[in-house]
Image: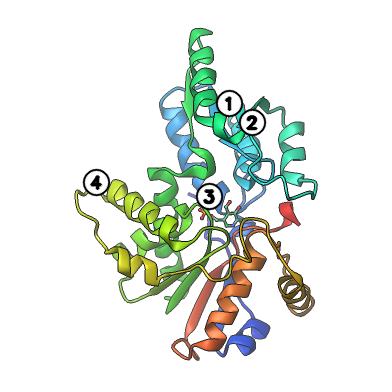
Amino acid sequence: MIEATPLQYSQYLSSLTETNFYLKREDLFPEGGGGNKARMIALILKKAKNQKANYIVTAGGPHSNFNRALALMSKKMGFKLRIVLYDNNPHIHQESLNKRICDQAGVEYSICTPDEVAQRIEEEITKLKNAGENAFFIYGGGKSHEGIKAYAEVVQELNTQINPDLIATTFATGTTFSGLLAGVQMYSPTTALLGVSIARKNEISVPIVSNNLLEFFELKTPPISSFEIEDQILDQYTFGGYGKSNKELQDFIRETMQNTGLILDEIYVGKALFGLTEHLKNNTKFNNKKVVFLLTGGIFNF
Ligand SMILES: Cc1ncc(COP(=O)(O)O)c(C=O)c1O
């Protein structure tokens, strides 16, 4: 059993948003360099171990926090790891510390273009099987029953720490958000939830979340309507897409770092925190209420 990640009050973010603002330090999760993806991977790799796998196969881009945490945690548990590597975002020129860590951890790459990914994954799994290896495939970013369960459990963990009025998180693939939504439904139905999208529009995000919940709860009809899901995801703060930024976002990040000492990256948490603070400034609903923002990482794409 892993200890709860710390919950820290922020005077600066509380004043800025007129709430009681707390940060749940998922970046301090004690495995794989930390972060939300590491928490998911802890459960996913347990399943791989139970299935007696010796090889892990996944796919992702060079900036993926998931890949880095998976590389470190796979190696710790004695798995070999092959990553189908592709770059959906060649506009991001910044060198990726995540990729360098994967390189040093001895990840095997199979490099392809984004439209070749599905085919390449199949080929790699077949190759490994033919070589007598027991390969376990993990969907890129950790979308899985275990990934969702990991964040449903965070709602329980939070209830032992504070009983929040609002939980907010960065929304990329939506796995973290889906887990929190499942957790809120099961353990904390009066708690509000907000995902702040860093890339996708809601017409793409909402069906993903809906399907995640259907699969997680093994239902035939969604436990929550698309309208209700849509209300809980903000998609107006994407700055034009994944890795896209501008001076307003950069100024916000710099000023917040100078006032909080937090490490905020432009791709994920810095962008989402911008959206959340804007939303809270423009809405009085959570004034003086307990708001928890999941600080899901940051340093590796800084
Ligand atoms: C640091 C960080 N925060 C938040 C997210 C968003 O998580 P999800 O993809 O589960 O929506 C990611 C996704 O890669 C991430 O790396």
What's the distance in space between the residues labelled 4 and 1, CA to CA? 30 Å
Residue 190 place in picture, x, y as percent: 32, 76
Asked if ligand 1 lies within 8 A of label 3, the reply is no
Under circle 3, the secondary element is helix
Under circle 2, the secondary element is helix
Residue type indicated by callout 4: Glu
Q: Which residue does the numbered mark 1 point to in the structure image?
A: 79
Residue 290 place in picture, x, y as percent: 48, 82
Residue type indicated by callout 3: Arg
- Identity of the residue furthest to the top in this view: 131
Q: Which residue does the numbered mark 2 point to in the structure image?
A: 75
Say above or below: 35 vs 54.
below
Query: In the figure, is residue 90 to the left or right of 219?
Result: right
What's the distance in space between the residues labelled 2 and 1, CA to CA? 6 Å
Q: Which residue does the numbered mark 3 point to in the structure image?
A: 39
Query: Which residue appears at 50% of the width and 47% of the height?
Result: 40
Q: Which residue does the numbered mark 4 point to in the structure image?
A: 218
What's the distance in space between the residues labelled 3 and 4, CA to CA? 23 Å
Residue type indicated by callout 1: Phe
Query: Which residue appears at 76% of the width and 57% of the height?
Result: 302
Please tell me whether mark 3 or mark 4 is closer to you in this view.
Answer: 4
